[in-house]
Image (cartoon, helix red, strand yellow):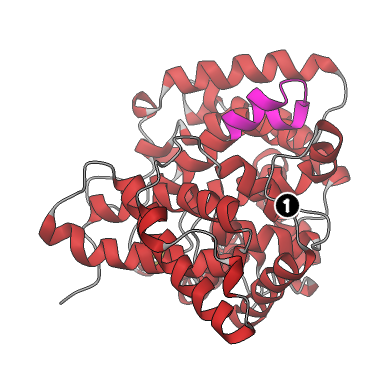
Amino acid sequence: MSTHPEPQIEQLLRELTPQVLGMVVRRYHDFSAAEDAVQEASLAAAIQWPTEGLPNNPRAWLIQVAFRRMTDHIRSEAARRRRENEVAVSRDELVNQPVAEEDDTLVLLFMCCHPVLTNASAIALTLRAVGGLTTVEIANAFLVPESTMAQRISRAKQTIKTSGIPFELPDAHERAKRLRSVLHVLYLIFNEGYTSSVGSELHRADLSQEAMRLARMLHSLQPDDTEGAGLLALMLLTDARRKARSNGDGELVPLEKQDRGLWDREQITEGVALLSATLPKGSVGPYQLQAAIAAVHDEAPHYEDTDWPQILALYELLKQMSDNPMVTLNHAVAAAMVHGPNRGLELLEVLKENTRLANHFRLNAVRAHLLELTGDRETAIEQYRMAANKTGSLPERNYLLTQAARLSSKD
């Protein structure tokens, strides 16, 4: 029997898993064992639900199955360590207990971003536990090998287990200390949903929607945090273009060719309003600047109307705040649109020695596009093909190969 669930069930499991994990961790205070139990419950659901139908309360079903797995785990540990007396509730008693309807996802998010973990480990663990990303997807987001990321996640789990971190929403002071990691996690989850790094689908709307939901929760919790508001605005303004980014065949449609009539104007209005209310409050951070860039794109009636000088100026500010090579890459694109492709190619030179981006497909893709604009067709074709060979996303690979084929067919 196949264990791969139907698409609707797969999406439902992805939405429910972090909520269920939060509930199990709250009850048992063992992150690593709880994650194993929830994974087993999800596997059981993937096998049973397609044939037996959805239970009346899928979330409660998953929680109860995970509770049973945890009870078995505790009994096994108790027998091995002579601690049977620590198991206070029998399996049957536990299964029959009512399941609380509260959503612990935000608590789980802050727990994974505890300062006892390094920033990199906290972000990786949260992407796994809250975002539901695979180790491969997380490694792609961090631009590191899969083996490195697997070790990082394993160490983070062990740290959580041995530290005795309480499962509770931290107070305002503690939240402020963890906020930077939390925002970065949500940003990465959203990005993986907006442009999936692997697989046959360009988007994973379940991930981007979950990131937006959590960003809203976070903004409600801390409405005066300007970067939290900026991140939510960035998500709204970016996700507004999602329906236009692929055609009926799932093929990627670049920004300059998108049907702007498909853009979600309600999200754009909400994002711009949120950004407009946030910017005057004082300190401007990277997420607000990225949201401002997205707003410039969204407010242009046509691609030709895009205010590239303003975008370039915003990227100049963003570069001063961030050492992210993707910012440097996007800055080069904006510079090329204002000062010509040769200027953009000059700015890309610094990224040749950047270990995080030197072998990333986007560097080759941008270089190919700028080389095409200069008229260097042969080198552009080479770069398009190199980019296609490096990406794990089938829609992006097909788009890049199509670009190379288009140039090859010219006289």
Q: Residue furthest front?
A: 85
Is 307 left, or right, of 260 in this rendering? right
Q: Residue furthest bottom?
A: 80
Give SS at disc 1: loop
Residue holding disc 1: 166
Looking at the image, which residue is at 67% across and 80% down? 151
Q: Residues in magenta?
A: 215-229
Looking at the image, which residue is at 73% across and 42% down? 339
69 w.r.t. 285: above or below? below
Q: Is residue 392 visible?
A: no
Is 239 left, or right, of 2 in this rendering? right
Q: Quadrant of residue 94?
A: bottom left
Task: Decide which of 208, 91 is in the foreground and name it.
Answer: 91
Which class describes the residues within 10 Å of circle 1: few (<14), some (14-19), or many (20+)?
some
Q: Position of residue 145 (x, y in %)?
A: 63, 79
Q: Quadrant of residue 349?
A: bottom right
Q: Position of residue 254 (x, y in %)?
A: 43, 46
